[in-house]
Amino acid sequence: MAEVPKKVLKGKIALVAGATRGAGRGIAIALGEAGATVYCTGRSSRGRPATPGRPETIEETAELVTGAGGRGIAVRVDHTKPADVKKLVAGIKRRHKGLDILVNDVWGGDALTEFGKTFWTVNLDNGLRMLKQAIHSHIITSHYAVPLMLGRGTT
């Protein structure tokens, strides 16, 4: 008989930025299994896909989190836009008074990647855009989210 996982994160609030698919989705579901309330954010939502050829959505991830035993909340956010992130974090603060876990998993570089080419032959504009999506998004999200984590204690 399989052991039922303990809800060690029950009552904890998590934000998984980039929860649409891949590692972000997997982390969000694992947090849900542990009982957390998980904000699943990204740009791909039902009726508004952001990555051509990829059908996954933040709503699906939120449903998987809830199905795993947590509470999944889907919020469409472009983490390269400070105003979007500021609005998201303000909503979390208003509803929960703080944040316990932040996972920065935004990348969005699928369509920009030119596998098999040397770096000096790839499209420079795409490479710089990828940096904005993959690095700037983490800095922006941390800038707004980390203050909600201060003084929350450890999990």
Image: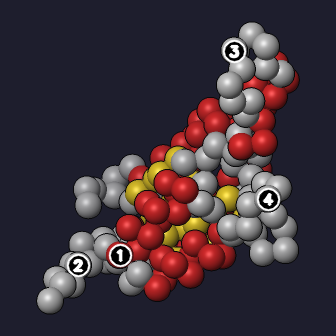
Marks 3 and 4, the one that precedes in the sequence: 4
The residue most toward the bottom is: 1
Q: In the rendered image, which residue does mark 1 sit on?
A: 33
- Cα separation, mark 1 vs mark 2, equals 7 Å
Looking at the picture, how far across and down is residue 94, in whole percent? 58, 70
Identify the residue at horizontal 69%, vertical 69% (top origin).
Answer: 57
Instruction: Kindly identify which numbered label has been placed on residue 118.
Output: 3
Three-letter amino acid code at disc 4? Answer: Gly
Quarter of the rendering occupied by the N terminus: bottom left
Identify the residue at horizontal 56%, vertical 81% (top origin).
Answer: 63
Q: In the rendered image, which residue does mark 2 sit on?
A: 5
The residue most toward the front is: 116
Task: Identify whether 123 is placed above or below 150.
Answer: above
Please tell me whether mark 4 sits on a helix, a strand or a loop.
loop
Three-letter amino acid code at disc 1? Answer: Glu
Looking at the rendered image, the disc whose residue lies closer to the viewer, 1 or 4, is 4
Three-letter amino acid code at disc 2? Answer: Pro
Q: Are marks 2 and 3 in contact (CB under 8 Å)?
A: no
Marks 3 and 1, the one that precedes in the sequence: 1
Task: Identify whether 102 is placed above or below 112.
Answer: below
- Cα separation, mark 1 vs mark 4, equals 29 Å
Identify the residue at horizontal 79%, vertical 13% (top origin).
Answer: 121
Q: In the rendered image, which residue does mark 4 sit on?
A: 53
